[in-house]
Image: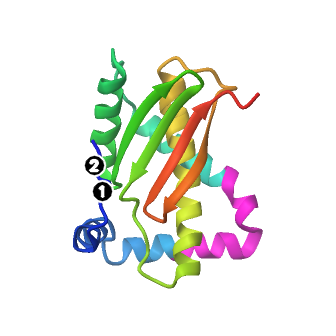
Amino acid sequence: MTLQTANPELMRYFQQQQTAPGWFSLLTIMVDGMVSNVGEQESKPFLQQMGAMMAAQYPLSAPQTLGELEGQINARLAQFHWGCVDIVADDSGLSLRHQALPTCNDDAARQSLWCNAFCAILEGRYARWLQEQGGQAHVVVQRERLHSVTDVQFRYHNPQ
């Protein structure tokens, strides 16, 4: 499932669906407070852990193919209006391109902070789901490329 669009109207629509009044404001304030109190880098392990806990709470079944895995993940992401992912396998691992990430509609610095926090949550969530599918603990999910604050590529690979 690919979104890849430069259509600002479509992106605004997705963002309106993803940012319920009140809840998203509360989450943004919590992330801002956490980063202010302990720092952005120091917050990352906690946010990854929260993503892993969410993955455990919303597990996947045992897909037989990469396409089924992608479909199950996208179904889970759709439950929360968290965008969609394309998964591509190559010789060194998996590439997970996540598009339509929820974003705050504030200034660029705050959008960047939120994107970094949300990426940490997704790293934990994707890592847990992939480990539950038979992945090894030493194989990690890391943000590989930031196309924009709503379009991020992750890599599932052995960092050694």
Residue for point 53% across, 80% down: 108
Name the amino acid, label 1.
His
Q: Amino acid at mark 2?
A: Ala
Judging by the rendered image, the residue that carries numbered circle 1 is 81
Question: Quick check: 80 left or right of 98?
Answer: left
Identify the residue at horizontal 36%, vertical 18% (top origin): 62
Q: Main SS of the magenta segment?
A: helix
Q: Would you identify the image quadrant in which residue 155 lies?
A: top right
Indicate the position of residue 152 as horizontal and vertical percent values. Answer: 49, 53
Mark 1 Cα shell of 10 Å, populated few (<14), some (14-19), many (≥20): some
Q: Position of residue 66 (x, y in %)?
A: 37, 23
Residue ranking furthest to the bottom: 107
Where 26 sits versus 94, above or below? below
Q: Viewed as shown, does residue 76 lie left or right of 57?
A: left
Quarter occupied by the N terminus: top left
Residue 133 % position (x, y): 47, 20
Q: Residue at x 28, y 73 (%)?
A: 8
Is residue 38 covered in magenta?
yes
Q: CA distance from mark 2 to mark 1?
A: 5 Å
Reading the image, the residue beneath label 2 is 78
Is 13 positioned to the left or the right of 153 in the image? Answer: left
Q: Secondary structure at mark 2?
A: helix
Q: Answer with the quarter of the image where residue 110 lies.
A: bottom right
Q: Which residues are magenta?
A: 29-45
Q: Please, is residue 109 above or below residue 45 in the view?
A: below
Q: Are marks 2 and 1 in contact (CB under 8 Å)?
A: yes
Is residue 64 inside the magenta stretch? no
Name the element at disc 1.
loop
Q: Nearer the viewer, residue 3 or 60?
A: 3
The disc label shown at residue 43, or none: none
Q: Quadrant of the C terminus?
A: top right
